[in-house]
Image (cartoon, coloured by chain):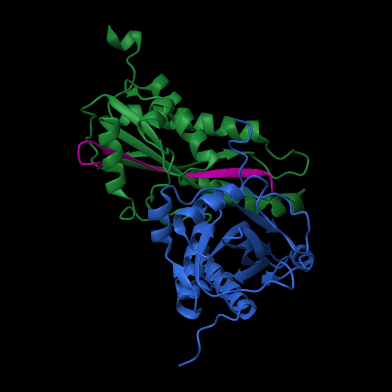
Amino acid sequence: MIKGVMQRLPVLILVMFLSACINTFTPVNSDFRAKGKTLAVIAGLDNQANLAAAQYMTDALKKNSRFQVLSQKQVAQALSGYPTPIQGPYKTAYFEIETDYTKTDIKRIKTIQQKLGVDYVYVLWTPSETVYNEKIHQLNIIAQMFESPNAREVGNGKFGATAGRTDCCLVPAPGDKDKADALKDMSEYVAKEIAEKTGMQKKTATSER
Amino acid sequence: MKRAIGFRMSSIKIVLTAAGILGMLSGCGVHKPFAPLNDNVQFKTGSLAVISGDSSEPTVALAQYLTQELKQRSVYRVMGQEEIARRVGKYPVTIKRAPPEKEDRPVWFAKGEKSKLDAMQAQLKTDYLLVIWTLNLRKMVVTSQQGGSRVTYSAWVAGNLLEYPKSRAVGYSDFGNQKNQSCCLFGKSEGDDINELLKYSAKELADEFMAATKSEKPAK
């Protein structure tokens, strides 16, 4: 029993460490309030996971905020060749994302913002996935929100979508559905945080009275 | 959607005894940084573009390092990665791989994917395309029974050299390397260590490529 716990200790420590590092959305200025209403979610990379993340975040922001969110279809129609990789805010991201906010290709984001004609673009990058003992899969995500017209950064976040909670040999490795569910859940959570921290949360019937 | 989250760029293996890692590494017998696909291939000098076979960070970095190596050390006129992106428009794009028909002389790209490479070459107009992929970038943490742990990074490289205007594969790469994590006293990050691993793989591929094509710049 003790041996089993000791064997799993490194994984437990890693998972606890990763959970502690979540930054869902931090406004650059703490008193930030969204001035505009229109928003587009952009996949910063062209891998399948990034496209899925952009889709789920689009759905989650539509559901949980007062932003008028462009659909991914509308984004693709407006930006030829979408998605194309955009240099993100990191130095390297082979496993952990080594953040460097000076690296983001602001020029590209400004162009995207102008083409879409939205007040805000929220760009998501999923440069890497980390797998622990084949049983715990974490998609590493970094995001930035920019305000038009000059693509000024108004907020950012760094978080992960984790599928699988234990590396116990009796528990099967998470499948594609588990990973999709983890990404969906995380998108819901982050979207609520974004809505709250930008003053764009949906008003409930009680609060409207 | 099923495949949407199914990609796998990297993984961490936590192994509790050294036996596990030794067993894994000893299973990897092939180490061909570059070799001709058949013995009768005649290489010519001319122009060459290193093509990143997907948009993952390690493959893009490897393409950049390999371009630098070949530019500096070979007689080929090697096109820069920025110039490739400028000419092709959407670059890098994924060139899908498939299990090769001949494992000892692999052609990695899937059927139907060669048209993507041909279309790129039509824009680049180089004599050769050297398309590369990185596979299975891994971080292995080996924890000993006595406490303490050791971290090793490893990555596999696959590649094919295509000759134009014949539009045929004439060479391949199929090899892996590993690197131990630097001592924390050196102040290197994980990214720095993996960059070094990829640089080493690029150098090794360039060495073998220049040997096979007899294209090393003469020493001054």
- Front-most of B175 and B87? B87
Q: Is A209 positioned to the left or the right of A157 in the image?
A: left
Residue A6's spot in the image, x, y percent? Answer: 70, 54
Q: Position of residue B88 (x, y in %)?
A: 43, 51
Closer to us: B85 or B178: B85
Q: Is residue A79 left or right of residue B48?
A: left
Q: Which chain is blue?
A: B
The answer to whether residue B137 is visible is no
Q: At x 28% / y 48%, what residue is drawn? A: A106
Q: Which residue: 27% across, 41% down?
A: A111
Q: Is residue A57 above or below residue B135?
A: above
Residue drawn at the location 60% of the way across and 35% of the way down: A179
Q: Main secondary structure of the magenta part?
A: strand
Q: Colour of chain A?
A: green
Task: Quadrant for the N terminus of chain B, please.
Answer: top right
User: Quarter holding the C terminus of chain B?
Assistant: bottom left
Is A188 part of what is drawn in magenta?
A: no
> Which residue is nearer to you in this view: B16 or B127?
B127
For residue A39, which quarter of the picture?
top left
Q: Position of residue B67 (x, y in %)?
A: 48, 68
Up-down relation of residue B95 to residue B130 (above or below): above
Span of residues in magenta: A134-152
Residue B202 pos. (x, y %): 55, 70
Which of the 4 image quadrants contains residue A144?
top left
